[in-house]
Image (tube, helix red, strand yellow):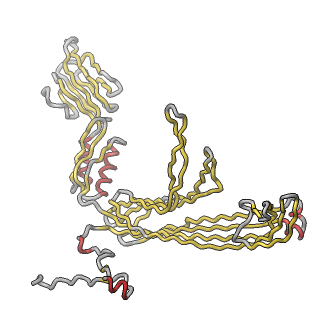
């Protein structure tokens, strides 16, 4: 072959060749020469290998990606190279291109080599086709594929989400609390902080004085029940293959110590989220929607708090799940089972006296608290298409502000405006 023509055939005449020999990893060539072969020199034996077949032919094998020099000397002229070539070992993009054309005949995708990777370019009909091209290219160049293809008219998925949460709390407390109080010089009673609950039913059972300290035994009875519900109905839109995130909750501050040159440690504040968050990643495959859902429910846990530089930082209790479902347009699914139940009971009393049968009830106080939280998430998926502005109805479209007579005389706060009349058939006159 000529000096500027690369060696492409499986068996090629390489006499007098000075150019480039490109092979894919694992590929090979048989090179033939017009004169007997003497010495064969390969710059980097880790890139390729040379095996003599006869006195006029050699077998070149590509071992790993890279580039090196291959020089073949003639036996009768050991000082004159018979062939000199640059051996370049890369990915089999030609084979990859043939595979892409065979598997995806209606798509426009091109594979090229750039550096140590393979680049895919072109315009595809859907995200499914892009994923197939990516998977096929990974077989030829594992972890070295850059997908720069674009999707013509990428699908948009509309997610109608309902997040329902119910919290139930039950608290009961019954017993006798022994508390201390101090009387000031005016004779008024000064209660110690945190000793009395104003919501409890209290009556003095007994009282004893030791100097300025008064000991009182109070009857404490309290029962509390509570139910709290939370309902969020967000609507999210995500492109096929992209992630949409919904979060409902709050943030609490966390002190963070940071070093500062010449000033030691400086405390800054960061905020940590808690509440309900759900991540959705829809992927459209023809008439089905593959939906990856990752819900997470977290709440502040003050019982597991820590003290950092004088700040009490609460912990978090987290419930997390991850699942993948396959739906059709308009179908729904629900995620349930995110249930948490906490039961806490405590007993306080005077040591020794609280353990006396029957009479010990006068020297102790017992309480328990039961908390229950349940979260249910319902998701409905639709393949969304853009629409015109005239198809949308806003809350302000039918609102009309009242005049002063209607506002002050009749107490009218708002009026409904008449809907715009539809144009007659054939246009307006």
How many numbered discs? 0
Q: Is residue 12 left or right of residue 115?
A: left
Question: Within the image, what quadrant is residue 362 found in?
Answer: bottom right
Residue at 26%, 39% in the rendered image: 113
Question: Within the image, what quadrant is residue 61 found in?
Answer: top left
- Quadrant assignment for the C terminus: bottom left
The answer, for residue 323, to whether it is visible in the render is no
Residue at 29%, 77% in the rendered image: 397
Residue at 66%, 71% in the rendered image: 170
Is 418 rendered above or below residue 294? Answer: below
**Residue 14 x/y as whole percent:** 18, 25
Q: Is residue 18 left or right of residue 296?
A: left
**Residue 258 x/y as whole percent:** 52, 39
Question: Within the image, what quadrant is residue 54 found in?
Answer: top left
- Tell which residue pokes out farthest to the left in this image: 429
- Tell which residue pokes out farthest to the bottom in this image: 410
**Residue 286 x/y as whole percent:** 31, 64
The answer, for residue 84, to whether it is visible in the render is yes
- The residue closer to the viewer here, 270 or 202, is 202
- Quadrant assignment for the N terminus: top left
- The residue closer to the viewer here, 177 or 85, is 177
Is 214 rendered above or below residue 6? Answer: below
Residue at 62%, 50% in the rendered image: 312
**Residue 203 x/y as whole percent:** 79, 73
- The residue closer to the viewer here, 381 or 96, is 381
Q: Is residue 152 left or right of residue 198?
A: left
Is 76 rendered above or below residue 23? Answer: above
């Amino acid at each position: 072959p000529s000096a500027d023509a690369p060696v492409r055939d499986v068996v090629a005449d390489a006499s007098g060749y000075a150019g480039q020999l490109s092979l894919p990893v694992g590929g090979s060539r048989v090179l033939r020469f017009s004169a007997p072969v003497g010495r064969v020199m390969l710059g980097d034996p880790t890139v390729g290998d040379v095996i003599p077949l006869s006195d006029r032919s050699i077998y070149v094998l590509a071992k790993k990606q890279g580039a090196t020099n291959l020089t073949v000397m003639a036996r009768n002229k050991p000082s004159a190279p018979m062939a000199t070539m640059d051996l370049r070992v890369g990915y089999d993009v030609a084979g990859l291109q043939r595979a892409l054309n065979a598997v995806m005949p209606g798509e426009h995708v091109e594979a090229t080599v750039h550096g140590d990777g393979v680049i895919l370019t072109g315009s595809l009909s859907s995200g499914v086709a892009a994923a197939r091209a990516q998977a096929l290219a990974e077989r030829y160049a594992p972890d070295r594929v850059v997908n720069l293809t674009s999707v013509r008219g990428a699908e948009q998925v509309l997610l109608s989400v309902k997040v329902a949460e119910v919290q139930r709390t039950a608290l009961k407390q019954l017993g006798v609390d022994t508390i201390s109080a101090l009387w000031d010089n005016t004779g008024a009673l000064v209660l110690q902080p945190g000793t009395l609950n104003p919501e409890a039913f209290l009556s003095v059972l007994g009282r004893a004085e030791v100097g300025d300290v008064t000991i009182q035994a109070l009857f404490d009875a309290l029962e509390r029940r509570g139910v709290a519900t939370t309902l969020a109905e967000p609507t999210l839109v995500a492109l096929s293959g992209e992630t949409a995130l919904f979060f409902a909750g709050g943030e609490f501050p966390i002190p963070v110590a940071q070093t500062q040159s010449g000033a030691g440690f400086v405390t800054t504040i960061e905020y940590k989220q808690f509440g309900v968050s759900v991540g959705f990643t829809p992927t459209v495959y023809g008439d089905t929607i593959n939906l990856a859902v990752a819900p997470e429910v977290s709440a502040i846990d003050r019982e597991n708090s820590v003290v950092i530089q004088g700040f009490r930082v609460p912990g978090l209790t987290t419930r997390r799940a991850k699942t993948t479902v396959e739906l059709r347009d308009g179908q729904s699914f629900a995620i349930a089972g995110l249930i948490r139940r906490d039961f806490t009971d405590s007993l306080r009393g005077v040591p020794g006296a609280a353990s006396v049968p029957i009479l010990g009830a006068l020297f102790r106080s017992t309480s328990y608290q039961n908390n229950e939280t349940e979260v249910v998430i319902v998701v409905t998926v639709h393949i969304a298409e853009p629409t015109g502005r005239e198809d949308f109805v806003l809350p302000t479209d039918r609102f009309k502000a009242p005049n002063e007579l209607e506002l002050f005389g009749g107490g009218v706060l708002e009026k409904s405006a008449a809907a715009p009349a539809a144009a007659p058939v054939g246009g307006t006159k």
